[in-house]
Image: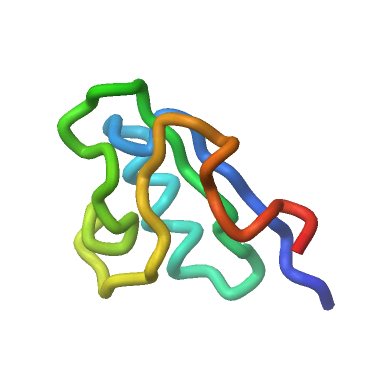
Amino acid sequence: MKNISVSIPGGNGRMGRTLLGLILDNPKYKLVSSTCLPGEAEEGIDIGLLVGKKKIEKSLNSCLLYTSPSPRD
């Protein structure tokens, strides 16, 4: 079965962090990206570290144009 790709806006908020942690723990889902507002303190932080898990090499971004990989990957 193919993984479900997910993008979470507001990943640095309480609900966003909760959702990110649940997504990272569930093999059914593939985290594609997570965003925050420009200038937020958490911008650029690795998403795994943000939610208290191991580094996943994807960072919290303020613009979907600069996230990778593409949601179509």
- Give the position of the N terminus as an image quadrant: bottom right
Return the residue found at the far front: 66
Residue at 23% over, 53% down: 50
Q: Nearer the viewer, residue 16 or 64?
A: 64
Q: Quadrant of residue 69?
A: bottom right
Q: Position of residue 6 (x, y in %)?
A: 63, 50
Residue at 29% over, 71% down: 55
Residue 58 vertical position relative to residue 53 in the rendered view, above or below: above
Residue at 38% over, 68% down: 57
- Give the position of the C terminus as an image quadrant: bottom right
Residue 5 vertical position relative to residue 44 in the rendered view, above or below: below
Residue 67 vertical position relative to residue 3 in the rendered view, above or below: above
- Side of 73 where 38 appears, left or right: left
- Side of 63 where 3 appears, left or right: right
Return the residue found at the far right: 1
Q: Position of residue 51 (x, y in %)?
A: 26, 55
Q: Quadrant of residue 65?
A: top right
Q: How many marks?
A: 0
Residue at 32% over, 43% down: 17
Q: Quadrant of residue 58?
A: bottom left
Residue 73 vertical position relative to residue 66 in the rendered view, above or below: below
